[in-house]
Image: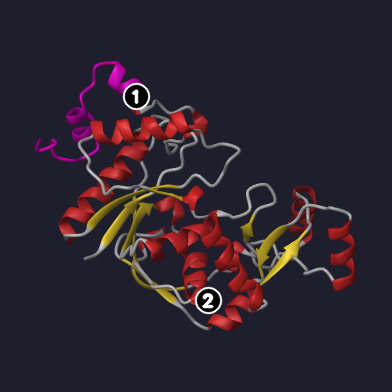
Amino acid sequence: MGAVRFAPSPTGYLHKGHAFSALTVFETARQLGARFVVRIEDIDFTRCRPPFEAAMFEDLAWLGLEWETPVLRQSAHLADYLAALETLKEAGLVYRSFATRKEIALAMLSAPHDAPDGYRGVPPAADEEAARLAAGEPFAWRLNLAAAQAAAGPLSFFETGEGPDGVHGAIAVDADPAGDVVLARKDVGVAYHLAVVVDDARQRITDVVRGADLFEATHVQRLLQALLGLPEPRYHHHRLITGADGRRLAKRDDAETLRSIRERGVTADAVRAELGFSPHPG
């Protein structure tokens, strides 16, 4: 049986954009006869909070969704992500990056106009690396994109939704715009791209259904799947819900939360209808 997942981060309360995504994932699972999985992506210990997680479950239940239990929390599986990172280290596909945000910004500004969009670091020489480690300098592990692409060879992924300019179907992987992405952060120990591909394989996710803002992330994630020998799911990127100003709803912009909408007396069926979904059959 296939599986589809809704994977929020408990860094704030859910809004209508999250509701649209969760309902889209749930309906896709129903249409495919697949499992509906909720995953809590809580590896960012600096921003994730238990009250936000509890509120998420309340909101999803209010919308009429049911999901598998127990729910997977990324914070409980850090050893698995570090094991995947170790595999990439042994293959020589990652390097320690001591670059600060300021140094990265300056490097990007000084890059030639025809250079790839993403940041390209330079792995430190062995003696420099040893000295900086001895000095206790913080570092991140970055993917060596050039080496990774050479090791993986040509790749593609299959899009059943719609990417930029309406692209769909078989799409060639082009991770150049992402550059040498961070796979393990200085403060957290693991980053989004690495954790998500490990978890999609662990939970046997066959269809990744998510917002169009994550379309470009698919290129890097498909590359990591190939490097780690992980299964390749299908992808379906859906439209984003926008506010009156035309901007997509976001926690950082204080989009109205589902709990606030509920407190105003709006029903779940009214929200479902506004987002284009039928009333909850229950």
Q: Is residue 277 magenta?
A: yes
- Horizontal placement of 269 versus 101: left or right? left
Please identify the quarter of the rendering in which residue 34 is found: bottom left
Bin the neighbour count of mark 1 within 10 Å (Cα to Cα): few under 14, some 14-19, many 20 and up. Answer: some
Q: Residue at the location (63% across, 65% down)?
A: 179
> In the image, what residue type sits under mark 1?
Arg
Q: Is residue 265 above or below residue 275?
A: above
Query: Mark 1 highlights which residue?
Result: 259
> In the image, what residue type sits under mark 2?
Leu
Region rendered in magenta:
260-282
Q: Residue at the location (78% across, 48% down)?
A: 102
Could you say which disc has been placed on residue 227 in the image?
2
- Marks 2 and 1, how far apart at CA: 41 Å
Seen as rendered, the residue at the extreme top is: 264
Q: Residue at the location (49% across, 59% down)?
A: 217
Q: Residue at the location (43% across, 60% down)?
A: 199
Give x and y (percent) for residue 104: 75, 54
- Horizontal placement of 223 versus 243: left or right? right
Instruction: Depth check: give the residue in front, 55 or 76.
Output: 76
